[in-house]
Amino acid sequence: MPRTEPQRQRTLNLIVLIIGLLSLIGGTFLSPPDPDLLVPMVFLIVILAALEFLPLRLFDNQFSMIPLILFSAASIYGSGVALWACIIGISIAVVLQLIFAQRITTSSPNNQKNLRAGIFDFGINSFVLVASLSLFGMAQGVLSLDFVLNENWLLILGAGIFYGGLHGVTYSILSYISSKGSVNQNRWDLLALLSLEILPVFFVFISLLFYSLIGDRALIIVGVATFALALLVFYLGAPRKNLERRIQELSALGEISKVLSSDIDLERLLNSIQVQVTKLLNVDNFYVALVDPIDQQIWYPIAVKHGMRQVWQRRPLMDRLTDRVIIDGEPILIPSDGRHELSKIGLPVGEDAPFAWIGVPLITSKQIIGCLALFSLSPGAGFSDEDLNLLNILSGQTSVAIEIALHNALLSSDITIGRDRLTTILNSVNEGLVLIDSAGQITMVNEAVTTLSGIPQSEFLGQTVPELPDALLNVIGYSRNDSNTFIQNQFSLENLVDEKLTYKFKDRIPELFVERSSIKVYEEDGKISGTIILLRDVTDEYLLKQTQDLISETLVHDLRSPLSSTISALDVIGDAHISGDPAGILEPSIQIAKRSSRRMLAMVESILEINRMESGKLELSLTGADLPALVNETIPELQITATDYHVTVTLEAEPGIPQIVLDKNKIQRVINNLIDNALKFSPDGGQVLVKVVPSNEENIEIHVLDRGPGIPDEYTQSIFDRFFQIPGHSSRKRGTGLGLTYCKLITEAHHGKIWVKNRRGGGSDFGISLPISGP
């Protein structure tokens, strides 16, 4: 939940906007826009607006890819065209964001953020552009100055380096000021910023080279390349942001767990919780309300308002938001416009009524003990479902911690004292807990361990760690050697909290990854009396990291090849242009650069088309078609590839197959993808067989059969996921991991089904079933 912008932030926005407008005036004066450049300017506006929708987050601020193409466009057409395209494109993007936000809610907390980001992008880019071009005498565009690229490359290089450096410094300073000096700096953000600020130099050389060859179409190539790069970074950034948020959540839970590991009191515990909530959700209004079951009164052990501790008096239960959460045991979320929502549900609205409110019950031992709540007193702020989910996660461990603090009974001098008393509490914890006494004997195991392992608690109790069977040792992540070492190190004061270890459960389908940490337990005299082993299911985080790495590897690999081809072709074009092209290689090199650019564009379009299908925005152009004839039209397109691979492609179709209603172009692409996939994995001299058969009176099936390595049973479903590659499978050429995803989505859009099974004797059988009557 972002806080509302204070007066200081609004002042900064105004200053940046004024600087941007003054730069616009100066840039227009130095190089007035030429009406003949309307078409390039319109294209530039569209690209800049699109880039504003794909920001990267660096130093807790939005960073767009606008500088990459803006500097190139200004170097060609002059500062006036570039600056007016910049303000118009960014304005269009901001207006569209505000319109879409208003359709969702009447008071979106993102409105101020989007407007501020637009102002910053315009102000920073305008100022840096005018300063750089003016200093190097390039404000009117290099092509208007009888410019020769190979004689002035040092000037362009200097201008590009100065532009990138000034932009990076300006962005960093404004990020630092807008965050009040608390900007979250890390190595990744710094490396990303340095890399992105170097790219304008690279892009301007490409632009000038292409412009000298193909004119205004150079802007299209550079614009598409910039958009492709922005899209790639945007999609790679989403998993990273989710992972970072998850890491923050886990870190907060870890901090609270550390408090649990010592003799705690309620005040220390609640202070720790308040610090973690403030850090995670960026709020300064927070309280915990506990209910006294004897006299049915609510009291507030901690309350923070505007960042200051408050003293709120005990009160009886009544009809308020806090009381409803406690009585009903259900969370309540008022994302925005809270005063209106309060009046709708019949609750009193006073001077301090919140504009946004979120509260979750504190439940432990199947009993509601209170409510943890956040609220906003500013009209521009709000909460989201994501905030509610995080608070729910936090409340689970918080509930147990508060009850333990209230009863002062986590562990005493003897780890077995109070075991029965704490069993119910420990069983309510989602993490697995294993308590081991000073003799190495397991004295308590909660139900979460059984949930993780499927092994009853009784199997663990009473056994020492070295005596555990291998199956039980695997549950707590120890080998046979580790179990013997564990007893020796249990009383070591060197490692009071063991480093976390992530391991995989053996022979477990689906895969399960567990994180283990252990904490020493002390007696009153300071001696170590035992150990708590904490087991947590981290399968989601582990698979998320794997998915992120796979997406990064796949996209970088698939974009690197066409980019390398483009750069190589440009080098050849440059040499040929200088030498007068005696060998006649200029035109083939241009074609290579075009093909490589189209390849990158095709990949981006595939990602966009799959996103449209997944969001339900796909439109089908339905018509009657002869399915065997459609396959016959597709096979010749792949005949050259089949010949190169020494593989034959044949069609078998039963006679009398009726016409079917479908989107001819899209189904033809599905068939093309399946045959191409079969060709990649078929051995030399192999055969790919395409069969068209009626499934029943209502459906027709298409089967693409090959004699490749087949599909392992555990991957027959995930093979249709985007970017998925089967580990250890090699083919004649590497795919993007999008082809089968496209086939699945198009088939399902036709109300059909797609599957894969292994053939007897080796190979795969990819089948799709389509309804004759169409979707």
Image (cartoon, helix red, strand yellow):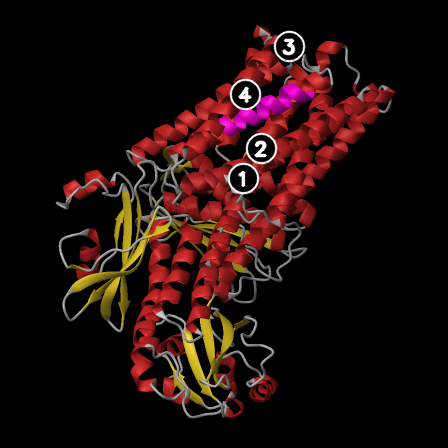
What residue is shown at x 72% (from left), y 30% (from top)?
161
Tag 4 residue? 20
Q: Is residue 547 left or right of residue 572?
A: left
Q: Amino acid at mark 2?
A: Met
Q: Are marks 4 and 2 in contact (CB under 8 Å)?
A: no
Separation (CA) of disc 4 from disc 2:
18 Å
The tag earlier along the polypeptide, 4 or 1, is: 4
Tag 2 residue? 65
Q: Is residue 274 left or right of residue 18?
A: left
Q: Is residue 716 left or right of residue 348?
A: right
Q: Is residue 565 magenta?
A: no
What residue is shown at x 65% (from left), y 14% (from top)?
78
Label 2 Cα neighbours within 10 Å, binned few <14 / some 14-19 / many ≥20: many
Label 4 Cα neighbours within 10 Å, binned few <14 / some 14-19 / many ≥20: many
What residue is shown at x 46% (from left), y 35% (from top)?
665
Separation (CA) of disc 1 from disc 3:
32 Å
Q: Position of residue 603 (x, y in %)?
A: 57, 39
